[in-house]
Image (spheres, rainbow, N blue to C red):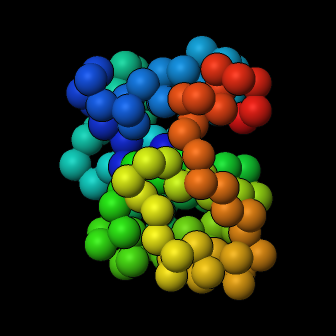
Amino acid sequence: MVLGASAKPDRFAYKALIKLQAAGHEVVPVHPKIKQIEGIAVIASLSQISTQIDTVALYVGPARMAAMVADVCALKPKRVIFNPGTESAEIQQQFEAAGIECVQDCTLVMLDQGRY
């Protein structure tokens, strides 16, 4: 899942979405205002997700993310990747308390290096 997906090709969230899809990963983009990105349906809110989520790639800053922590925890993903600019010790502690692995890294670099 790409939380904070973007339809703008110059944004890292867009690049991650495209690269994840190209690598064969099932991608669930989440953004409240965008309907689709490159033909992929975008989910407006976390509460609309009914499938199991393995990894959440965060592209939402801590100020906005604070209101979504409970919804992410309810999805019970295996891990959350805090991409550059999304880091928050407080939010990370909440995820870890819910049993979610937290990684501070870059989704794009992880994919390039085969560490995703």
Image vertical order of residue 51 relative to residue 20, above or below = below
Q: Residue furthest top?
A: 22
Whether residue 40 appears in this view of the structure is yes
Image vertical order of residue 39 relative to residue 107, above or below = above
For the point 37% across and 19% down, which residue is it? Answer: 38
Whether residue 77 appears in this view of the structure is no
Quarter assignment of residue 112? top right
Q: Is residue 90 left or right of residue 104?
A: left
Question: Which of these two is toward me, 90 or 66?
Answer: 90
Image location of residue 56, percent across then percent down: 59, 52
Q: Is residue 88 left or right of residue 38?
A: right
For the point 50% across and 82% down, which residue is it? Answer: 90
Image vertical order of residue 83 relative to residue 46, above or below = above
Image vertical order of residue 7 relative to residue 38, above or below = below
For the point 28% across and 54% down, which residue is it? Answer: 32
Image location of residue 49, percent across then percent down: 55, 57
Quarter assignment of residue 104? bottom right
Q: Quadrant of the C terminus?
A: top right
Q: Is residue 26 left or right of residue 30?
A: right
Quarter assignment of residue 41? top left
Image location of residue 18, percent across then percent down: 48, 21
For the point 26% across and 41% down, which residue is it? Answer: 34
Circle count: 0
